[in-house]
Image (tube, rainbow, N blue to C red):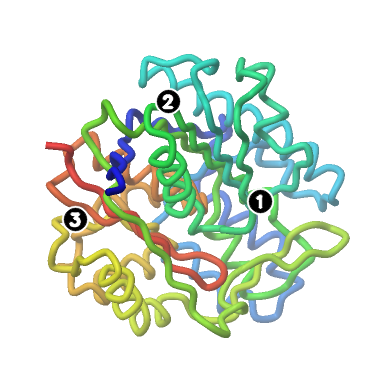
Amino acid sequence: MSKVRPKAALLSLATSVPPHIFLQKDIRDAAWEVFGSRFPDYERFASIFANTGIIKRHGVKPFDWYLTQRGWPERTAAFFEGAEALFIDAATRALAEAGLKAADVDTVVTVCSTGIATPSLDARVARRMGFRSDVSRVPVFGLGCAGGASGLSIASRLAQARPGSNVLMVTIELCTLALRLDELSKANIIATSLFGDGAAAIVLRAGDGGETLVEAVGEHLWPDTLDVMGWSIDPLGFGVILRRTVPEFVISELKPALTQILTRMDRTIADYDRFICHPGGAKVIDAIEAALSLHQGTLEHERAVIADYGNMSAPTVLFILERNLATGLPQRSLLTALGPGFTASCVSLRRAA
């Protein structure tokens, strides 16, 4: 008879943001100056800035840096500098909270979709962090906004496969570096109104410690949805792809997909006391509440995080998880995020006792 492996437990979670703070009203005014005279339809889209629910955001560069057109070399240099600093800060905080040092880490999972690094970010910071030479590195690219949930899923399975080992998962996104001054499109205006920078780190171990267990994980990939969300790539950098209305997609497609995922976990939506959801924006939060038949206002932490940080892509749902942990998780919670693919990623969490 095969031995049942212990579930992975969350030992710690830490978040980090870069030092530059941008007020949404200042971004709105700057966007009008940059796009207004060149984009005939801009006035029709300008109200987007007021409807996001965002008050402020963080960026790795000062405000004026973004008002000059940048190419790949400048964006990449900014990515290396900003991403490495955030990796070190978030990871160091998470390890300290878990009572560990970098040398205690056996596996590092690094999730990022807003910059290209070879060697990967974990290798670039390894010496400064103090990782062992035999640490296992798992860099993950392309998950976008789903990366926080999918990265936690990957890290939890690696921890469960080697009980007693320490797995560090770090997700970093520098969405502001994809700001494009040349793209006169609704998708680019939406991106300009939403995205900020941030990072989160989690330490997991299976077999001992941790009050919150990763009970099960699952994903759903919708066919023929490559145009919902993603990056285009050209000589100047990344350009956002948003060719379908995400709130409408959520209302029609989210609940059936979650039902399929949970059926494979032998669970139902009714089994969960709380939902912890990646908030694409205020309208997406409203759509999630409608799709899951939640009372309006239920996703209060989601609204608070989007107000304080904007949409940071992958790390955002872990900022929300951090607030839920601080106020206390119920017996069972479902962490969910949607991202390019188009994909729904789910992590079922439950209290250890």
**Disc number for residue 94:** 2
Give the crowd class for mark 1: few <14, some 14-19, many >=20 residues within 10 Å: many
Instruction: From the image, tell me which residue sits under label 1.
Output: 114
Cβ–Cβ under 8 Å for marks 2 and 3 = no
Tell me which amino acid carries mark 2: Ala
Name the residue nearer the viewer: 289 or 128. Answer: 128
Observer able to see residue 29: yes
| Residue 320 drawn at (x, y percent) | 33, 46
The answer to whether 216 appears left or right of 179 in the picture is left
Observer able to see residue 52: no
Instruction: From the image, tell me which residue sits under label 3.
Output: 274
Q: Secondary structure at mark 1?
A: loop
Q: Quadrant of the C terminus?
A: top left
Q: Is residue 126 above or below residue 7?
A: above
Tell me which amino acid carries mark 3: Arg
Residue at x 25%, y 69% (from the top left corner): 289
| Residue 188 drawn at (x, y percent) | 65, 67
Labels 1 and 3: the sequence-earlier one: 1
Report the Cα–Cα distance between label 1 and label 3: 30 Å
Q: Is residue 312 above or below residue 326?
A: below
